[in-house]
């Protein structure tokens, strides 16, 4: 393909985004008081492509925090209505960081498979993923530990650390077909211009405009230099992450868990901001007229007390320790057996937004290195 | 892509009282679904009630009657309260499913079946019993152990006599305590008072050639399995059922996750030695 490497001059970025906004619903990172948010772009001047992280990852667009799945009438003779919204304007997720793009790949695996989720795929199949090479990491980030390429992505390659279903295997997953890449477009800021890599056939829809120029291979080298600089800023907090699933199970009864969970306030923020957390609750909300209602699904969190409670008051994870362990063991020890990759992408959100300063990379490093607590 | 969240409709054909205990009302709903639901013993369905939500429930009916779905419900929460207290014959109900893995009856072929239940746990095992009675020649002896808090909490009491009438079937019933001043349901059937583990030991079982199916509250399952293992049964021959909160039934919502295992998809029937390795259980 000849058009897989393009250049977008920076002064034309706004024009391009404006054009996209006419045809698509563009979601993008923007400033929100002190932090950044990922939201519907209404004014293209709000667009911020240099940001460290949005509080809530773009998962909230593909798997909304609260979504109606069925509408019902209290008259049972009437059928329930399936609430799959028809999408007139496809969605463009613009400026997604590579870590979040990997999170979306993990979502694809979770919501795919035997019981594929129709609500997720309705939005996902109608969306474009425009990633941007991350140039603003902070001290919480550790994407270089959890993926091969860290702050950037590569065409047709899923670079998540694969663990081969729990066996010692450092291989990087190669996607079978070109169209299955992690992104449709990848932008990299080269100072006065953006290098645009087309990652899929779908992505070509977005670059059919005449704002683009052909790129040379030297631009690719310029990108590599930038990525190299960014990589140096990122802490490799969990070196050789692929062996964590083997190491972690032997520390299941370690006292460190108790010590760490004593700090936990069980607020559930870590799971709320996690790009790979997907748990949800299903609830019926009946209107006050008692004639109709909606079956909604709402994000849920395994850190909350009532999450594992069953009828008659039994709760299988009453203890905060059990709940903290459930989160970290699921991400780092059990995910490979279910989905073949690790469940963490190293975005650092759960560390950054934890009000109790629980750092899962610190816990793991203590296990991997000198054991301070017996 | 089929939308598995949309339930199928069914009509309640009959409601059978199972126990009259004041504290716990247990009833069996006999539901005639609009579409046939094929299931195997040990699978569960999501019973859906508009305005109340959904709940996972074991199918307690005969697996060879796919046009009838029976669920046996004890009143414990909002949805079950409504089903048990205010449902009438002819009311409509909605069902999704079936989900989950069934009891591994193929492993019991040519072996003794030992069925152990506690409380309403018998609801997941009744399909096994009905299936085994229809295919009697596939199995050797069948021993059914039933326990409950008190006699009026025993379920399916009317059927015990039918089951015993078949050759080589033993039904052994025990209760924890006798109620004062009430006449228990099914009093025509002789039952013991005491621990189900004592009852298991009082009956001669064949540890080398039996398939044991246990469905009881988790602490009780632990007690039963420990005793069976110490009496020479191998852990691989014991299967148990686990119950967890479920919101989707198909391994997406994450509520029933235990380690890398999802109770709804990989269970709810587990081999005992595998179940013991799972975190956050009482086993």
Image: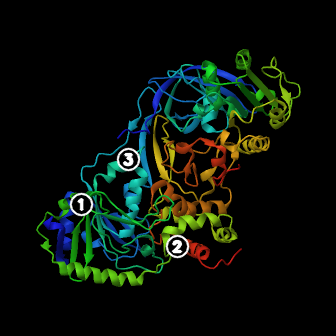
* Crowdedness near tag 3: few (<14), some (14–19) or many (≥20) residues, C-alpha within 10 Å: many
Q: In this view, does A139 lie to the left or right of B19?
A: left
Of circles 2 and 1, the one toward us is 1
Q: Which sits in the foreground, B84 or B256?
A: B256
Which residue is depicted at the point 82% across and 19% down? Answer: B187
Question: Which residue in the protein does label 3 denote?
Answer: A119
User: Are the numbered discs 3 and 1 placed on the same chain, yes or no?
Assistant: yes
Image quarter of residue A99:
bottom left
Residue A286 pos. (x, y %)? 49, 40
Question: Which residue in the protein does label 1 denote?
Answer: A200
In the rendered image, the vertical position of residue A162 relative to residue B206, given as above or below: below
Q: Is residue A21 left or right of residue B183?
A: left
How far apart, in angstroms, are the residues tagged by discs 3 and 1? Answer: 23 Å
Q: Which sits in the foreground, A51 or B59?
A: B59
Question: Which residue in the protein does label 2 denote?
Answer: A351
Furthest toward the left, the residue is A210
């Amino acid at each position: 393909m000849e058009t897989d490497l393009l250049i977008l001059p920076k002064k034309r970025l706004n024009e391009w985004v404006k054009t996209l906004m006419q045809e698509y619903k563009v979601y993008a990172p923007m400033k929100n008081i002190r932090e950044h948010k990922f939201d519907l772009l209404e004014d293209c001047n709000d667009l911020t492509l240099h940001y460290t992280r949005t509080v809530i990852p773009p998962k909230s667009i593909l798997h909304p925090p609260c979504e109606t799945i069925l509408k019902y009438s209290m008259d049972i003779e009437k059928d329930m209505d399936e609430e799959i919204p028809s999408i007139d304007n496809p969605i463009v997720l613009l400026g997604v960081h590579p870590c979040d793009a990997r999170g979306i790949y993990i979502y694809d695996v979770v919501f795919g498979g035997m019981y594929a989720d129709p609500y997720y795929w309705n939005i996902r199949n109608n969306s474009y993923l425009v990633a941007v090479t991350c140039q603003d990491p902070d001290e919480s980030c550790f994407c270089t530990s959890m993926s091969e390429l860290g702050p950037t992505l590569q065409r047709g390659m899923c670079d998540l650390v694969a663990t081969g279903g729990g066996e010692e295997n450092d291989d990087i997953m190669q996607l079978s077909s070109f169209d299955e890449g992690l992104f449709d477009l990848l932008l990299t800021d080269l100072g006065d211009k953006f290098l645009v890599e087309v990652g899929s056939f779908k992505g070509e829809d977005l670059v059919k405009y005449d704002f683009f120029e052909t790129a040379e291979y030297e631009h690719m080298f310029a990108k590599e230099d930038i990525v190299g600089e960014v990589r140096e800023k990122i802490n490799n907090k969990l070196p050789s992450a692929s062996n964590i699933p083997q190491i972690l199970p032997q520390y299941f009864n370690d006292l460190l868990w108790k010590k760490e969970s004593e700090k936990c306030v069980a607020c559930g923020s870590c799971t709320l901001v996690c790009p790979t957390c997907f748990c949800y609750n299903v609830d019926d909300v009946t209107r006050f007229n008692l004639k109709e209602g909606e079956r909604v699904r709402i994000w849920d969190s395994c850190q909350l007390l009532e999450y594992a409670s069953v009828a008659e008051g039994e709760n299988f994870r009453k203890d905060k320790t059990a709940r903290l362990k459930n989160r970290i063991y699921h991400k780092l020890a059990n995910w490979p057996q279910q989905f073949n990759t690790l469940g963490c992408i190293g975005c650092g959100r759960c560390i950054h937004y934890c009000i109790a300063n629980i750092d899962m990379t610190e816990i793991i490093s203590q296990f991997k290195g000198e054991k301070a607590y017996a | 892509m089929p939308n598995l969240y949309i339930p199928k409709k069914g009509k309640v054909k009959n409601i059978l009282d199972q126990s009259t205990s004041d504290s716990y009302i247990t009833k069996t709903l006999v539901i005639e679904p609009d579409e046939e639901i094929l299931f195997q013993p040990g699978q569960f369905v999501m019973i859906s009630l508009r305005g109340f939500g959904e709940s996972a429930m074991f199918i307690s009916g005969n697996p060879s009657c796919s046009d009838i779905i029976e669920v046996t419900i004890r009143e414990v929460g909002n949805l079950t309260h409504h089903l048990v207290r205010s449902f009438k014959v002819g009311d409509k109900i909605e069902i999704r499913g079936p989900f989950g893995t069934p009891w591994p009856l193929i492993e019991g072929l040519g072996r003794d079946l030992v069925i152990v239940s506690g409380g309403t746990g018998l609801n997941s095992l009744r399909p096994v019993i009905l299936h085994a009675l229809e295919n009697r020649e596939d199995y050797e002896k069948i021993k059914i152990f039933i326990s409950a808090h008190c006699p009026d909490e025993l379920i399916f009491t009317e059927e015990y006599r039918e089951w015993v009438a078949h050759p080589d079937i033993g039904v052994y019933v025990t209760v924890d305590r006798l109620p004062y001043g009430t006449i228990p349901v099914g009093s025509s059937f002789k039952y013991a008072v005491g621990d189900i583990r004592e009852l298991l030991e009082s009956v001669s079982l064949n540890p080398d050639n039996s398939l044991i199916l246990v469905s009881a509250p988790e602490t009780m399952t632990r007690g039963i399995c420990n005793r069976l293992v110490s009496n020479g049964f191998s852990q691989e021959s014991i299967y148990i059922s686990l119950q967890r909160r479920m919101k989707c039934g198909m391994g997406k919502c994450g509520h029933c996750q235990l380690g890398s295992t999802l109770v709804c998809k990989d269970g709810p029937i587990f081999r005992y030695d595998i179940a013991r390795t799972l975190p956050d259980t009482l086993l």
